[in-house]
Image (cartoon, grey):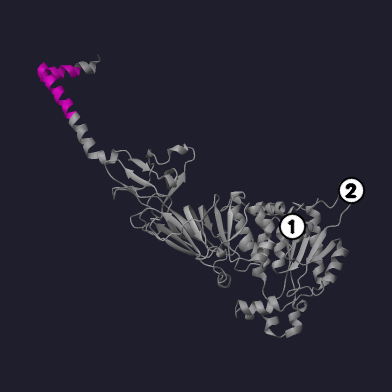
Amino acid sequence: MTEKDLLYDTILARSFSKNEQKRLGYGAFIASLLFVFTLCTVFKPYLSPLPIVELQIPMNAGLRMLRITETQKQQASGSSDNATSGDSENLVLPNDQINITSNATTPQSITSSKDHELSVGNDTSLPKNMFNSTTNSTIAEEHVTTEGNKLEKTMKPICKKLARTEICEINGEVRVHGKSATIQAAITFAFSGNSTWHIKPYARKGDVAAMERVREWTVKLEQNAENANISRCVRNHSVPAILFSLGGYSMNNFHDFTDIVIPLYTTARRFNGEVQFLVTNKNQPWINKFKGILKYLSNYELIYIDEEDETHCFSSVTVGLTRHREYYKELTIDPSDSEYSMSDFRKFLRDSYSLRNAAVRPLTTRRNQRRRPRMLILARGRSRAFTNAGAIARAAKQIGFKVVVAEANADVAGFAQTVNSCDVMLGVHGAGLTNMVFLPENAVVVQILPIGGFEWLAKTDFEEPSKGMNLRYLEYKIAAEESTLLRRYGRDHEIVRDPSVVGKRGWEMFQSVYLVQQNVSVDINRFRPVLVKAFELVQMQSV
């Protein structure tokens, strides 16, 4: 015992007897217990664990595990009432019909806000015979408020409005009735959110002329399916479905790819062929044109859903196609928003059409023989046609090219082989240049711009997309003397002298003059440096 302890015991002995010291110790112990009990009583609401919930899952819903993910802590009260922001808008759907009751002493309810995302996911790791069972699970919640006597069902956005497209992804009991253009999702509980969504499944939203040619569909949430006016299943399908339109600007090669083919690829590829295509606005020539691509994306025969009076039932239906989120992005896939890229898409095209050349071939063969690079000159039968294609071909041959002059047609498979065999593709601004998707990597694209102020269109439609395809891009802007509009209107006419004035009168005026009435006669001497540059680029890439 230390000197300090001895001093303490001496002082205590002088002040209290032994019996008094014992009574003092007992009193201190009882006081401590009272203090601890008081703390537990006061702070009990804050220290209690999260509730254990009881999940009662119906047989037809399958086993679901509730997962709540907080994307951000809740902001000040009232700041999270709006569920949409920016250019997007969501329809919120209960993801499944899960009856959730709490056995905790304090009933609680989960609420969703702008800053909180609630989702339901499948847990396939649990045995299938656990359907219709009662499971206790702890909710790792981030945002729970005490309001009712039941944990409300989880909500999830299923319909999205983006800058250039609308898309709905519906899971559960989904019924499609073609003649009424209606898609019904059956639910068995009360639902207070939006229950109806109107959608045109074509990926060029905002273009009035295109969207007028697209049939509108209605997505409905039907409560109490057994009693509601909901279609009876006639044909049941074991694979998911994608519903899309072949209206809009289909059969224009540029729009075929940027509005339908590429969006269809990014939407359907993940199913590896196990998906049923439902086509609205039937377009048989389009289907014949792209049958090679359709065959590689779906293992099942197309259903022309508009003609169907029978109800088709699926466990999952996607209405509409995904597309790049930015409004003015054409012939492009955003890899940050998709699991695929334009490189993946071009490889898919090579596989679909059995194209041999993934990249530009060396100009020197294994036997040390020199091959001449191939140039494709895109001919056009109507507007923006070359009036001196023969002279261009002769100039290209003098520089060292082997030249092919051809016009794109409905035989996509055949023309894809022609394009893929070439090192350079040359053409006037127009849909024909879309065939650059078949060029081998490091090939050269030469876009010729007529008069009329095509710079913005040329950049958006072909220059920028060519970068995502790993192609080399060259551009040639013709002079007024190289346009047939000069001979038709004269040099002093505003159409030739100041195309911006015509452009201000609207797209229809611009289109009728510069896209329809104009042909091109290239000045060979002025154009020759572009041909030389294209030859040099091919030589550099094939080394």
* Residue 16 visible in the snapshot: no
Q: Is residue 409 left or right of residue 173?
A: right
SS assignment at label 2: loop
Determine whether 473 is above or below 44 in the image. below
Q: What crowding class fits label 2: few (fewer than 14 Cα within 10 Å), some (14-19), or many (20 or more)?
A: few
Residue extending farthest to the top is: 1
SS assignment at label 1: loop
Seen from the viewer's position, the closer of residues 294 and 153 is 294
Q: Residue at x 77, y 76 (%)?
A: 482
Q: Label 2 belongs to which residue?
A: 368
Q: Amino acid at mark 1?
A: Leu
Q: Position of residue 394 (x, y in %)?
A: 87, 68
Q: Is residue 224 left or right of residue 423?
A: left
Seen from the viewer's position, the closer of residues 54 and 59 is 59
Sequence-first tag of 2 and 1: 2
**The stretch drawn in magenta includes residue 30:** yes
Q: Label 1 belongs to which residue?
A: 439
Write the start and end of the magenta stretch as one range.
Answer: 7-32
Determine whether 267 is above or below 460 in the image. above
